Amino acid sequence: MNEPAPQRIDFLCHEIERHNYQYYVLDDPLISDAEYDSMFRELQSLERQYPSLVAPDSPTLRIGAPPLQAFAKIRHRTPMLSLNNAFSEAEVLAFDDRIRELLNIPVVEYAVEPKFDGLAVTLVYRDGLFVQGATRGDGETGEDVTQNLRTVRNIPLRLNQEQTTCPIPLIEIRGEVMMFKEDFFELNRRQTERGEKTFANPRNAAAGSLRQLDPQATSRRHLSFYAYGTGVVEGYILPDTHSGQMESLKELSIPVPLQRRVVHGTEGLLAFFREIGELRKDLPYEIDGVVYKVNNIAQQARLGYVARAPRFAIAHKFPAEEALTTVLDIEVQVGRTGALTPVARLVPVFVGGVTVTNATLHNEEEMRRKDIRIGDTVSVRRAGDVIPEVVRVLIERRPLDTMEFQMPKVCPVCGSHVTKEADEAVWRCSGGLFCPAQRKRALLHFASQRALNVDGLGEKLVDQLVDRNLVHTPADLYQLDLQTLTRLERMAEKSAQNLLDAIEHSKQTSLARFIYALGIRNVGEATAKELARYFVTLNKLLAADKASLQLVPDIGPVVAQSIAAFFFEPHNIKVINQLRAAGVQWPEEVNHGVPVDSLNGKIFVLTGTLVSMSREEAKSKIEALGARVSGSVSKKTSYVVAGAEAGSKLGKAVELDVTVLNEAEFLALLTRK
Ligand code: IVH
């Protein structure tokens, strides 16, 4: 070879990546595998000879990285959200109605695309170079899987920027990593051959493969990526529609789904749903529905977000799969809040991609309505991550000797009497934290990943800790020592120490996680976050009454009542104090936003129409924060809130140099986002 090494290396890098793109993105190889391999080996050998010439986007980096000890955590620049679901045409019509009403337009333009059944990741490109990739994690923080994502052959290591005048300083691309059905079957075949565990479905296989600490292991797993949007973009203006943005990504050589369209109104949405439904079985990857997104980005911004999901998009899911099996037994489980749930033990059956052995019967009323008995042949349904359930009984197959199942009159775990409130369908154990089942569930919830995240505190361990009276409340976890733990079954000194380390580690947390961990009825993760954001300190939350709790976005009277009732109980306050005394803490979020009472005495003027609330609601929220609303703008006005089609008051505000807030800024001020 006469060509100097630097030029040859550069040429090979480009050629190999070009052929990667042809093969993995366009599905249109231009050369044979042998020719490709020979170029790859030549590049490897040149790079070995001249290590200083290895380019940051060399295709050899797709296989070479050394194994990691653990994944680093990455905080997403903007949160990775989820989608609300629609399971019926009626829900799709309601979605479209809502959008038309909020935007006040007769027909909405939507961008529509498949809903990939993989796992969400985000890819960061700086100056065109792939520099970082992370999993979704809890939406705020994910895991750094950059090296593993480099092994995904259809992810470009460098963006194709022929169309752009200069490299894009920063662009974050969001999408889904998947394993093609073919690769999944092949992987399971190999796993069986080697006597290793097989995967339940392509999504689990993709997730397991992406979370390998050894990138070489990921590299052998054949994953694929498809983009469905962007995150933060700096120094570059993307088109003002979702469909336009997807076109731009495609030009940058990012893989985007082939089946994407722009449609108008619900007819277009439903036609796409049917079309993709028919195509589903022939697609190389698994999809579990389609996604509808308002196409215009400015309209998306006006619609905004509720909790963790955008208002401008919805996932229309395919109906769940069903299969027939037999009920072997019915057991009654006691949940965290004492609810008694009848659960059917089933003859194992493969449905919706996994083997199902249990199905929830929800509560006594549901069980009676469907008349489910031991010995019955039933149809079970499973969709996505939801708990499998029994849809119906095949009465014609019922054996002669069945009996109606009777709910127990006392708690099957602690023997306390069971109660049912007038407006509720569930029986509850009245034992509270006296009931070991409730205590166990509460502890598992407290220790779960999204709460205080005590790694390694699983069901078996919690069973032992509670059954041996070593732990009564979450606060007791922080009093455990090595000696006590090593006396437990299957607890060598090393695992005991690991658990103590995990408990110690869990002390550094956030207020939102702490609130969620308490397991207050009706307070899920999203509500906990809103509470933390709103009240900023725990003491302010503890001091809040039902009325001020309802000022928090998405909190109504029922949730406010649960929260107030929880903090009213002295034993709950005692546990909170013990946890704080044991060292559970979070950064004081003093600089996080405007202090709670900082709107005291401020004067607001409202003009135009707000999308997210009526004028009355806005007024009462402002007043609840100690400020007041005036009808006209003067020099004394603190803020003018300008909604859509704001009138002359906006002009006056500009004239008098009064701060003008748009709707998003106003909401941020109210909720301190
Ligand atoms: S858009 C702002 N589009 O579904 C919301 N998500 O259930 C961003 N997903 O976490 C999501 N296909 O991982 C969007 N075409 C698609 C998708 C898609 C699959 C996943 C995504 C998200 C989850 C929400």
Image (cartoon, grey):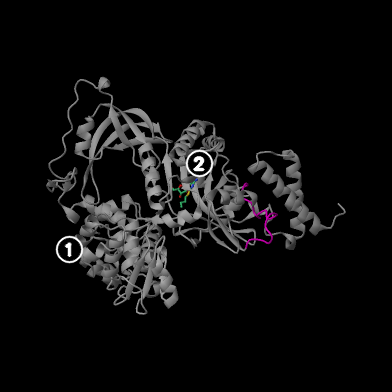
- Residue at the spot of label 2: 263
The percent coordinates of residue 67 (x first, y second) are 57, 55
The percent coordinates of residue 333 (x first, y second) are 24, 43
381 on left or right of 158: left
Label 2 element class: strand
Residue bounds of the magenta highlight: 153-168
Task: Name the amino acid type tagged 2.
Answer: Val
Dividing the picture into quadrants, the one containing residue 475 is bottom left
Marks 1/2: CA–CA distance: 54 Å
- Residue at the spot of label 1: 569
**Viewer-closest of 540 and 295:** 295
Residue 567 visible, this angle: yes
Mark 1 / mark 2, whichever is N-terminal: 2
Dividing the picture into quadrants, the one containing residue 590 is bottom left
Residue 472 visible, this angle: no
Question: Which SS type dominates the magenta stretch?
Answer: loop
